[in-house]
Amino acid sequence: GGNTDGGEGTAGGGNEKISRFHRRAMSEESSFYPGVPDATSRPEPHVFDTSCAAYRALATTGADQTILLSGESGSGKTETAKILTDSLGQLRSLAQPPGWGDDSADAAAEAAVDRIVQSGLVLEAFGNASTRRSENSSRFGKFVRLYFKGAATARGESPAGYAHAPALVGSACETYVLEKARVVRSRRKDQNFHIFYQILAADDDFKASVWKGLAGTGADSFRYVGCSERAVIDGESDAERFGRTVRALEAVGVREGRLVTLLRAVCVVLQMGNVLFDANPNGKGGSVVANPKELGKLAEVMGVSAGDLVTAFTLRQVKTGRIMFNIDQSPGEAAKNRDTLAVAVYMNIFEYLVETLDAATAPPKERRPSGWERAAGCINLLDMSGFEADDPCQFEQLCTNYANEVLQVRYVEDNIRAIDMELGAEEKRGVFNYPEVLQLLAGRCGLIAILDEECLRPKASSQSFVDKLKQIHGDNSCLIRKKRAVGDEFGIRHYAGEITYKSRKFIARNKDAISDDLVGCATKSSNEIVSSGFVTLLLSRGGPLDTVLGTFKRRLKALMKAVRATRCRHVRCIKPNDAGMPRVTDHLRVLEQIRAARFVETLAVSLGRYRHGLFHSEAIDRFRCLWGPEDDVEDDVEDDAEEDSKDEGRKRAERLFERLLSGYDGGPEGEEGSFFMCGRTKIYFRGGSLEYLGAKRRAVRGAAAAKVQSLVRSRGARSRFLVLRGAVVAVQTTFRRCIDTTLVRHRFGACVVIQNAFRFHRARSDLRRLKIEAAARRIQGWYRGCTAKKNFVEKVTAVKKIQAFHAKSVRRASFASLVSVAVKDSRADAKMVGLLGDLQQLSVNGTRSTVLERRSREMLLYAREQILQLKNMTSNQKNDNLEISKQYSNLQHRLVSEAAVLEAMKLEMAKLQETVKVLQKELSDQKAASKSKEREQEDTLFMLEYREVEFRAEKEAMRNKHRQERAELKKAMDAMERQHATKSSLAVKERASAEEELQRKIDDLKRDIEEEDLSNKLAFRSMMGALNGSCGLGAMESDVASVATAEDDVNGEEVGADDGIPETGRSVVVRAMDNIDVEGILALDRVRDMGGKRPDARGGGAEREKIVFLKI
């Protein structure tokens, strides 16, 4: 096997090449006898030959078949398995004799083949990934059973001596060891599973229909995926491959709602990786979510509240007896819980897919067989992950390499040891060391048993596991010991080379444990795919520890047992080069793989012995056609049933094949019978002898078949000629009609072209005219606009001049009136001044009238004051008028703006009313569309209510149990209290007396404190009196230095919040002169400078005072 194009690329040349190879392979007459190839006309080695051989064996013998695929990672096993599946599905139509076709059976077989092929594409999307070795590497093992119906139990039971062609009716798939650690982390230059990149490459509309948080995202938006270095795989982009995956899912029944649920479950895994954790900022330990926005997205797509997710990630419940308490998790532990839940969710998705695919491709229920048709047989395809030799390897690579060791042992048993045991050559036994490797891995005290034992120990570590492995298997040659090896590393010498393993996470991955907190949180998910697997896991808790390697070992043992019950064929895939380049072969690399697979020993055993064996009766029956009429062996063959001696049968076979091989000289020369050897039950042939007999047999049977074929073909040719002549007449009629129709179409097309040209010319003329008119209109508009603008500017200029002249005249008139008023006022003032002067002069001259003079002076002064007041009132009135006019103009402007706003609001209201109408229409459409969804939601709600009822019943039972336990505990406590009540009466009396004595001491202490407080107050008052006397304030009133609260008056002024003195608490206010250092005398809380003036007792000067505030 293998692929000369490198990697896991295309193998084979399409359906045409498949059919051509199949027809050639199925035409071999010797193909009805399994295990007897014909090298003279056999095509080049190909996987089609393997599929044809398995199909022929199933059709003729009815025995189940198995094809085992093996090889290194990236050698082409995945593509080879797809080719084998396609070829096995097409063999029915190629192997069925003419006239045996059943349209309904063929259609059912084609539908079954299509479903099986589509299921393989789905598993490829969810289980394959790009690695350093291959763009499409399978990261899990699968065992596919292809069920066929109609296989004959033995040759000759089918009509006319043909072996009936079985039809493919269904399949079943079992998966092994998915590399689930790749979900959360992958190695350098490796990628995650294909489905993540495919769904992110889809268009935004589809992603938004799955989950609105997926729209506009790419591979760099999610931590679990990262940037994709390979956007194209096998010539197809991720978007194209996603379309093919969606079509495959729809073909197997996952469509519409189920498809959205499945893809949302994938989104749950993607989004879970974006949730990050930081240390708790309050310093009490634990962790918090660093990005609550990403947590909200996860809660939305998962259908779980954000609080439940935070509790499951950052807390761990521990049960001690009947008490449950929570333990805070560090950020690293919270991230580990997140990764564990993501891996478990993806495993649920993969298991759901496998179950769905099995249900879609399962064969129909068998009816009771009648005639020569029997129950369905099967051809099995085993495709395990390839052998991996990374440095160092992890736990998943250990599982994969262990499976490849088992397959290699099976290959050795089928190709070397079976030949040794059959021919009795025992010297080849013990050459291969594969059992020693398996003893190291899966023996009674092997690596798997040691690792399972370490998983049960509470304080086990990777170092203790490696030490125990080296201690127990120190003498095993397959265990490599390095002097400079790291403590948790160990090496194993596999059939493909020496591999180093790093056991740092072997114990944790072998346990594959998930906490009840995470399981309980996942069961609350509204996504059925996410929650269903966890519900099953929760119900199955409580049993013994089931490790990953232990389970895989048991499943692999059962698999090998099933394989041994079938006829096995092996396909070994050879990787041509490590660079994945097409049509390039690295001969040293290929030779290394051939030596590791022990092909050289296999060929040495096969070529050095009798390679092919047939039972005596089978060999005689096969070559009966080569006998001549003069042979006397025919009588011996007829009497063979009457004789019981095996020696006689062997002698007859020896006489027959000595005569038949007398003319064969292609083998080594030697004694008689060197080309074959007769045993007790079988006759064995050396290389070339059986091929020589097959060539003679084909020549004889070919001559006889040619005569039969000539008669059949002549009759068929005559009937075909008549049919062809009628067909030729029909073709000529159709051809002539087509010619005339074509001529009419051409003429009609020419007319249409002429019409189009004429219409084009006329339309172009109209367009030119319209352009000229449009240009003229633009010129006219520009000219008219310029003229109107010029006129407008001239009018505006004239209006401004008129307004300026009018304003100037108005201001000039008002100025003249003001000048006249001022002149009149000045004259009146002058007159008054003159009158006053005259009166003064009269007084000087001594001719004054005392009363008249006094009254006149008073009248003049009064008149002058009234005039001044009137002038002030007039000026104030003018100012008020100006202010009112300004306010009036402002009100007018505001009124205009408010009116404009009102009009805009009316327009906006009209638009809003139209929008409301549109929204109401859309709402009615959405209501109509959501009715179908409501039905589905009702079903889901019913299931949730049913689960809730079960949960409530369990909860009520637990509550009743707890009530009973609490009642029993209360009774026991009451009894204990009654017992201790009598014993503690004396202690109660003593404690009461002690409390009374303590209360008495407390009262005395309070009384002493009050007396001391009163004495302190009196001392403070005396100190303030002394302070006032020493500062020279004896002449002031007694209330100046008095002590008061915040509500008292100081010198007739109330001291409160307005004076800057607090209103709460006992306060003291003291007045002092500026020259007294009050702050230096007392410890002050606050000093405020009042800045007021107080006349002294003598009515002279004034000094600034300070109000000193003290808190008692």
Image (spheres, rainbow, N blue to C red):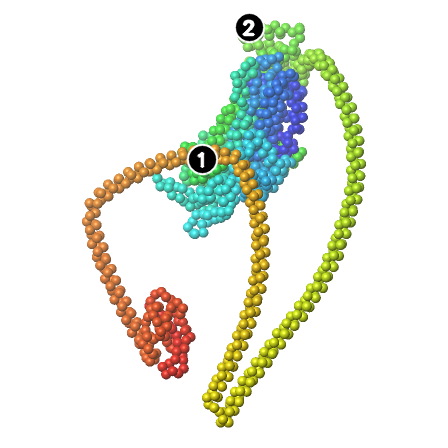
Picture coordinates of residue 937, whole percent (x, y) = 49, 35
Q: Quadrant of the N terminus?
A: top right
The residue indicated by pointer 1 is: 944
- For the point 58% across and 64% down, the residue is 889
Q: Is residue 502 above or below residue 1094?
A: above
Picture coordinates of residue 784, whole percent (x, y) = 74, 57
Figure quadrant of residue 823 = bottom right
- For the point 31% across and 76% down, the residue is 1038
Q: Which amino acid lies under the numbered mark 2 shown in the image of this protein?
A: Glu
- For the point 56% across and 7% down, the residue is 641
Q: Nearer the viewer, residue 1000 or 795?
A: 795
Question: From the viewer's perspective, is the residue at label 2 or at label 1 nearer?
Answer: 1
Q: Which amino acid lies under the numbered mark 1 shown in the image of this protein?
A: Leu
The residue indicated by pointer 2 is: 642
Q: Quadrant of the C terminus?
A: bottom left
Label 1: how many residues lie within 10 Å, few (<14), some (14-19) or many (20+)? some
